[in-house]
Image (cartoon, coloured by chain):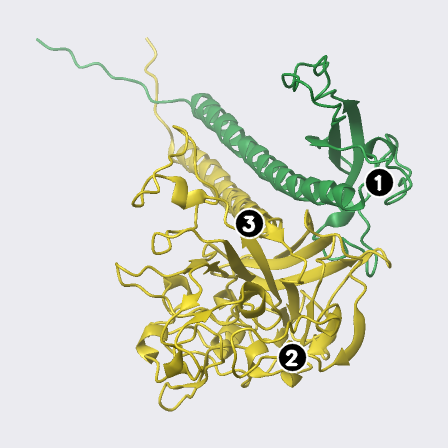
Amino acid sequence: MKTPRGFTLIEMLTVLAIALTMVALTVPIFGMATKTVGAVQRKLTIYASARNVLDTFEAEARLAISNERGGHFSIKKLAFQDSDPFTPQESFPDTKKYVCSRREADCLNLVQLQPGGYEWTGKVGSQTVPVLPGAQPFPLAYPNNWGRYAEGWRVELTSSLSYQTPSVVDVDQDEGGSAKEVTDQLADVSGITTPVHSYAICNYIKDNCITEGYPSSTRLYDEVYDQLGPGKEIKNARRAQTEATVPSRQHYRGVSGIRVMDLDIAYWDDAQRKFLNVPDARVVYFAPPPKAVRFTITVCDREKRYGSITLQRVVYLPAGHGQASVQTTDDNFYYNYSASGSNPANPCKATSFNRTKRIKNLPPIYIGDWVWDAGDGNATVAPPFSEAPVGPADPGVFGTMRLWPSPPLPLNW
Amino acid sequence: MKTLRRTRGLTMMEVLFAIFVMLIGLVGVLAALPTGISSAQWVIFQDASINLSASKFSEIRRDRINPSAIDGSYEPLNGSSGGWHDFAHGPGDTYENFDDIAQYEWKVDETRSTGIGSAAGGPNGYMAPAKGAAQAGLMQVTLAIHRKGTSRSFRFTQFMLPYE
């Protein structure tokens, strides 16, 4: 009988050497494969998120309406130069979009009809018309407004570089609870957000107007003149009334999972048959709206692990039927306000529309309602006919708001 | 009395065979990774296609043209077999800045009159006929987005008015 023998030392060492070699070869292969999968997955995440962002923008823009008095559809073009090493610096950053340190921060302002939505869910008082079982109100996000029906909504789609959201939303706050300053956003482009503000058009019989400098105590608002005309678009978000009994007429929607570094909005010039941008630091009030707009966004993830991608989306506007032939010689005509009187002459003149206006040459009403004195938090501009509260404001409600205009100024300001 | 029995160890050949089996298993695992990457890239293409088709449908609606006679209104045929168009991405073009746009192409794959609104109803039973309504003439338009160099494409369908 033959006794089987075990490994000799040499055999054992040979087997170990082969096994170790295989393991050593496997580890980098696994590492490389895992890294590749991770990169692809991150890109996939960004792609999917970017498309969802564009879906949201399209859904908002397509609800735009217009009326015979020209209100309201406008595009503001603003751009800034960032200081984030994440984006390569160029010698002439203001001429190169998306790939270097020029950040597009456009604003789209429009009006939407109130389509029912929340008011029809049976939640509020006597407004008990329910949606069908299993159905959803649309749009989902609009809240109740003092139990009243809103006639419509002023809507602003913007970049937080141009107009900041009050510090009521976590994603827009810095560590101290204040809205992120523009300088901070430019130093870290993953801090830029694209909020959508909606402000209800309703309940515009206003009392106690004498205390606000008007000749009579009650004022019936002219909807177009006071709410829809050029200059009456939402700019900096307004006060968010958080008391349980007085819910705000304003609503905020933000995108938090992905960061939109660039928000560029071009309009369709039907005569030239191409998409064009409003020149830097200009605004165009369209009447009627253009047939289409094109959103271009550059996005990154919050940790900026995977570069960035740029996507574009053409959005057809059902209410748009304008040629959108814009006069590009700047003018200083603006929608003028009367200091008194409840129904001044209709200021919606043709000179208000379809031409570029240099924002810095327009009155503050076109730039931002909320302009704060950095020293004491008082509002230094409280325009007539605005919903802005008059008198000292509570900076604690808003955190630190940007002074408009203030450094860092937009490019070509 | 218990007899001690000596058990033998593994032979060199047995150990090498075991290593070979393990290697097969590892290769199997590694072989799955490219599949995962490919799937992820497929989903990225799907996302891009959804985005681009929505955009192209918007262009057709914007211009109010008949989707069944679209050639000549947009980008010219790019010469590849199958009648595909590039997405215009030259300087100043609509898709100039869309990431990796050069790898995608599109075409109107199919248009069909649905007959929605006619007394007889649609030929494919899409919708009950609207009594008393005139022929709406909605068209079922299918756009295809193709990724060049692959056999991959997605098709998207919407109902549109056939503007003449």
The residue indicated by pointer 3 is A56
Disc 2 versus disc 1: distance between alpha carbons?
Answer: 40 Å
A146 in relation to A372, above or below: above
Q: Residue A371: image x %, image y %? A: 47, 82
The residue indicated by pointer 2 is A359
Which color has been applied to chain B in this rendered view? green
Q: Residue A164: image x %, image y %? A: 48, 71
Q: Is residue A307 visible?
A: no
Q: Residue A322: image x %, image y %? A: 77, 56
The reply to whether discs 2 and 1 touch (Cβ–Cβ < 8 Å) is no
Q: Amino acid at mark 1?
A: His
* Number of the front mark, 3 or 1: 3
Which color has been applied to chain A in this rendered view? yellow
Q: Chain of mark 2?
A: A
Q: Amino acid at mark 3?
A: Thr
A27 in relation to A95, above or below: above
